[in-house]
Image (spheres, helix red, strand yellow):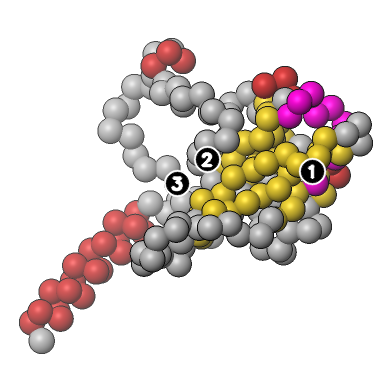
């Protein structure tokens, strides 16, 4: 019984620390940023961390800073499952698409342009499964994958489709 009491006390203390992160002004469970360990702001932008450049084809968790968000009218995601992300940005003068994709377990997603004409660009989102008989988690991740176009996107429509899984 004493062990259970200690666990409950520790859990309550953790809950109080999490409650302190809730913004009292919001009152709706909105989280405020954690307090800074330093009260002085960075003296210039060169003091801020700079994310590494994104290499086309290499999944990341961030969209490049110079990206522009495509409007939903320019994205045709009708062939994707309803719960699949529908976020596409363009960078590098319009020649690189940054697509928020979905992968899970031991799978890894990639983006491959399979058609490019004057009206549309069709991107296959392919999830490749590990070839070993290893145990895999049941998590879902949403990395950003890139696809390089042969010409700037311009006003063309981006058609996203999920290709069958590969092994």
Residue found 23% across the figure and 63% down from its top: 13
Q: Secondary structure at mark 2?
A: loop
Q: Which disc, if any, is residue 122?
A: 1
Q: Range of the magenta residues?
A: 149-159
Label located before the other in sequence (1 or 2): 2
- Horizontal side, residue 83 vs residue 102: left or right: right
Q: Is residue 81 above or below residue 31?
A: below
Q: Residue at x 53, y 28 (%)?
A: 54
Kindly report which numbered mark, 1 or 2, lies closer to the viewer in this rendering: 1
Label 3 or label 1, whichever comes before in sequence order: 3
Please provide percent x and percent y for residue 60: 50, 39
In terms of image quadrants, where is residue 152?
top right
**Residue 128 in the image, given as x and y percentages of width and height:** 54, 54
Q: Secondary structure at mark 1?
A: strand
Q: Residue at x 14, y 79 (%)?
A: 5
**What SS does tag 3 mark?**
loop
Circle 3 or circle 2, nearest the eye = 2
Which label's residue is closer to the chain start, 3 or 2?
Answer: 3
Asked if residue 30 shows in the view, the reply is no
Task: Locate residue 89 relative to residue 36 in the image: left or right.
Answer: right
Marking on residue 59: 2
Q: Count every numbered label the image shows and give the total.
A: 3
Position of residue 52 measured from the top left corner of the image (x, y, whole percent): 46, 25
Question: Dot 3 corresponds to which residue?
Answer: 32
């Amino acid at each position: 019984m004493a062990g259970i009491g200690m666990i409950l006390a520790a859990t309550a203390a953790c809950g109080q620390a999490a409650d302190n992160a809730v913004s009292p002004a919001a009152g709706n469970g909105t989280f405020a940023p954690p307090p800074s360990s330093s009260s002085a702001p960075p003296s210039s932008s060169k003091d801020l961390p700079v994310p590494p450049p994104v290499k086309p084809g290499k999944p990341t968790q961030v969209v490049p800073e110079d990206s522009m968000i495509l409007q939903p009218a320019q994205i045709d995601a009708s062939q994707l499952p309803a719960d699949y992300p529908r976020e596409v940005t363009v960078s590098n003068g319009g020649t690189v698409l940054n697509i928020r994709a979905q992968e899970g377990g031991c799978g890894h997603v990639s983006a491959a342009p399979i058609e490019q004409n004057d009206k549309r660009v069709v991107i296959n989102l392919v999830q490749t499964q590990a070839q070993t008989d290893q145990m895999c988690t049941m998590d879902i991740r949403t990395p950003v994958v890139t696809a390089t176009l042969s010409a700037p996107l311009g006003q063309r429509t981006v058609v996203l489709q999920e290709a069958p899984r590969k092994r």
